[in-house]
Image (cartoon, coloured by chain):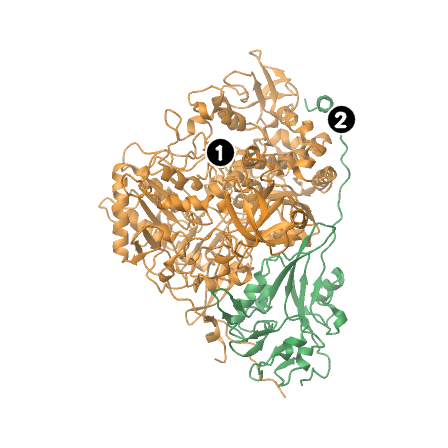
Amino acid sequence: MTDLPSKAPARKLGLVIDLDTCVGCHACAVNCKEWNSGGFAAPLTDTDPYGAEPDGVWFNRVHSFEADTHGKGRTVHFPRSCLHCDNALCVTVCPTGASYKREEDGIVLVDEDKCIGCKLCSWACPYGAREYDANEGVMKKCTLCIDRIYNQNLEEAQRVPACVSTCPVSARHFGDLADPESDVSRLVADRGGRPLMPELDYAPVNRYLPPRTYRSQQSPLNATADSVEGKFLQWVDRLLS
Amino acid sequence: MRPTPIDTSPPVSDEVKETTCYMCACRCGIRVHLRDGALRYIEGNPKHPVNRGVLCAKGAAGIMKQHSPAKLRKPLKRVGERGRGAFVEIEWDEALEIATEWLGKIRETDPKKLAFFTGRDQSQALTGWWATQFGTPNYAAHGGFCSVNMAAAGLYTMGGSFWEFGEPDWDRTRYFMMFGVAEDHASNPIKIGLGKVKANGAKCVSVNPVRTGYSAIADEWVGIRPGTDGLLVFSLIRELLLADQVDFGYLARYTNAGWLVIQDDGAADHGLFVRDEAGNPQCWDKALDGLGPALDKNANPALIGARTLADGRRAVPAFELLARRFLDPAYAPEAVAERTGLAADTIRRLAAELAHAAFQEEIKLDLPWTDFAGRHHDHMIGRPVSFHAMRGISAHSNGFHTCRALHVLQALLGSIDCPGGWRYRPPYPKAAPPAVLPTGPVSAPGDPLAGPPLGFPRGPEDLLVDEVGAAQRIDKAFSWEAPLAAHGMMHMVIRNAWAGDPYPIDTLFMFMANMSWNSSMNTTETMQMLTDKDPSTGEYKIPHIIYSDAFDSEMVAYADLVLPDTTYLERWDCISLLDRPISEIGGPADSIRQPVLTPDRDVRPFQDVLLDLGARLGLPGMVDDRGDALYPGGLPDYMLRHERKPGVGMLAGWRGAEGTSKGIGAPNPDQIDRYIANGCFWTDAIPEDAVYFRNVNQAYRTYGEAMGFLDTPDPVIVQLYSEVLQKFRLAAQGHGAVQPPASERDRVAAYFDPLPMWYMPFEESVIDRDAFPLHALTQRPMVMYHSWDSQNAWQRQILGSNRLYMARSLAARQDIGDDDWVWVYSHQGRIRGQVRLMDGVNPDTVWTWNAIGKRRGAWGLDTDVHEATQGFLLNHLIGDTLPNDAHSNADPVTGQAAWYDLRVRIEKASPGDAAESWPQFDPLPTNTLHGGAPAVLRYGADFRGDS
């Protein structure tokens, strides 16, 4: 089995995802697919791509479902990817050391050279974040764009995960959740960001921001006349004529 | 055990080319990363005004579009019967010779026998001009079934509209209300804007029968019954008027509220404005206590009160007529509650919230400005209420008037092009309506049209009808059936050409228009019309069909000659201010595409082919005096050198010999290079004092004139009361030289109301509502909206089959459960599909995702894919004509296809019915026309650093 880092990573890089603004457009999912198709874990194989049962490796998937909000059926768009847990059982169950959590930033990665495709990690992950590439015979997963976020060949503004860079509604945020002063930590504090299924004790790093409640701002309208003719007479008096 | 060291800084690409996306109509700037000449990664261009670095799912899936196995490879000539999909590949020379022969004969004899319609076209500045030079009035793009109600209502009311004509002031708005918006042409700008609205704590309200997409994140979802949005708007206006929550000062200065309207029922000028001898509209000026020019600097118009004119006749201010219309108790919240499906209290509260945002959250900018009349204002006052509306109100037969009502609401709140309100995108505002008239057939074959095919009639004399009132265009646009059909009526072309009504044509020439599938109403019959023969001659009723597409769409099989186009990454394009602008509210913008890849097939860009055909045909403007091609370099050559009028070309940036002019200037040989160096786009910032109230702002009028944007020097006064509509009504009542035939009189008189009106959508009003008790809608998902070849390897994994969505409450009444198969019946026919239950849908409405259903064999897909076996189209249920007469199933004012009027009933399929969608059609064999599809796609494996 594989050990987690002996001490907590100094930095906990992760995502903060705003469920109040996610419109379910799949921009993040496809941009992730596109970047990673040529990146660290390439290829993200697609099988039967033009046939009856197309399937493929996606590090980021958006699930849309209805949550009952007083019978009005709010559709929630829920993007799901690796949460880079502090207590990542997908790592500790790995028999070969292929799955590991980086000491320097907490990112959970798969070393494909060591992966034997046994899928124990995907059984251990309660979030369904592991993606088995049957064609390649190895497990793959979100790398938090490890080949972007430190990449000196990219402009500094681009050194964020592809899903964050492309999100049109700015629903995705990237940063160090170990630093209470970071933008993402402040966002979590301000908006009541939540970990996903904390009761399972995987200690996920990523946070989700819940939908906001909007309070109506208005003063009731006072109809100033009780008939159409009354209204016209009033307007005549009030210099509209 | 230490992990294998990883390279966190690998090279991304060896070349980055900037161009413009075309996965939909949004036209974002993209940066295309290439490795060894192959596509590595497409990302949004951070500097681009449209998308500012973001990119949607479609844009990112561009890689798979480029690698689609459905790409056509070579020109094709039909062999065997039309519609079977049997072709032989031919050389381009032969293909162009065939087309030249067919089109040459038409031009020599009767040019209108060419019907040239472009579907998902973004080059109408070129294609419309080409039709003009050919001499056929039978040209349009797909706007007639898209959103012409929206465009026409806005352009006739305030010289702009939602959509590409304007957008909310996202940064400042406090209250954003959208009507019938699922996705939009402005895909990323709306998403960016919604993010801002939310971040700023402003309220977002969605009026929509279905709570998906943008509606899902709205702070309030108003699940209205389809076709009743107008009633809601009427009721909101009534509440605001009754409570005096209206900007009377704005109305008096910048709308025609104070213009006097002649009240002399039966007279030829009844309902027209009182004008002086020079034609200036008159008001009752309170300071003068008499008639005065309404647009004068010192005008002080009365908004209420009948007056007696010098000739003894009565006249009233337009506002009084408008107020009487909207104050009618028929529009009280309680009176409309049942029909809209909304609680009266909800309507009252929404009105109160609008008033609160507009007047209690007023914005005051320290920006002085001067209006057209010379009135100086120390501040710019913002009423931060903004609206956006789309097909949900547009694709109904009452859509034009509903859109008009929405613009009246904006004007009553004083929230047009103000801080925090809805804002124009230059070159809009144009005159209301724009000063361009449609042009009819030529008098002598060989001549070009005297003007553009499409335009904006200002009265009956501008219609394209003959002496007896019959249509002159094949689609009957600008006839008495659809007088203000500003975008043409592509949805009627095939039926009319098949029927020879108003006349037979020779050749149907189409580009990117899937008319034999998801782009037609009444698809089954449309397919039959395309293949129907005249029994007496054995010839096809539509003799020739030429079709251009990059992909093997369902339409390819119905062509006699196929001209294969390139992908958007393989060609030049021009997104011109003369066409559908990409401008932002802060200033004009245009852009180009440059080829970033070289085609690996024998295909040519459609626009190059069009210019080549034009030269072969010797069309004016496309050949010189000796008959040689004027633009042998194709589209880039045309972009650079063509001038529409002196100094005005396809591109507005870097004009003049030195590249220092903008808007107007001589052609610049380096212009395209300048665009490429700037990321393939150009923008200009409007001066600060000209940036708001542009329809009436003198500084903007000066700027717009210098840029060549203004079609008239006059201010654009908001036309609450439409004199243009009244002129048509007068004609229907027997006045004037051009009058409708008897068969159309009642219809024109009824629907050309100078004030907004609401009426029940046509289909609903004539069918048996008990037999068809439900509304049925279809919408495109965000991941595919406006995306040609959307069933590519990645997009189809996200959405590969569609369901019929219905409310749990409705399903329970019919004992229908999730995954059940049902028959859906309309007056037109029936289809079979599979159900998915939900809560977030109006309980009288069912809906599905459009165009997921594909015909077997099309689009490079296997014949057993879910798109074909489970996917279905509602189109088969939607009539192209009305159930009770031969009129188009369309808005009576604009001819907008009314595909959201559909009424249906649902019946559970019987156990013996196959678990498969219905109808099914013979598989198309055309997948022999393109490359084979791989069983496993390992795209990107070669890019991996260690491979």
- Label the orange chain with its letter: B
In percent of width and height, residue B761 lies at 56, 35
The residue mark sitting in front, 1 or 2, is 2
The quadrant holding residue B314 is top right
Q: Is residue B808 above or below residue B109?
A: below
- Label the green chain with its letter: A
- Helix, strand or loop at label 2? It is loop
Q: Which residue is mark 2?
A: A225
Identify the residue at horizontal 64%, vertical 60% (top origin): A171
Residue in front for this viewpoint, B399 or B597: B399
Q: Is residue A194 visible?
A: yes
The quadrant holding residue B46 is bottom right
Q: Is residue B452 visible?
A: no
Q: Which residue is mark 1?
A: B713
- Helix, strand or loop at label 1? It is loop
Classify mark 2: residues with Cα within 10 Å, few (<14), some (14-19) or many (20+).
Answer: some
Classify mark 1: residues with Cα within 10 Å, few (<14), some (14-19) or many (20+).
Answer: few
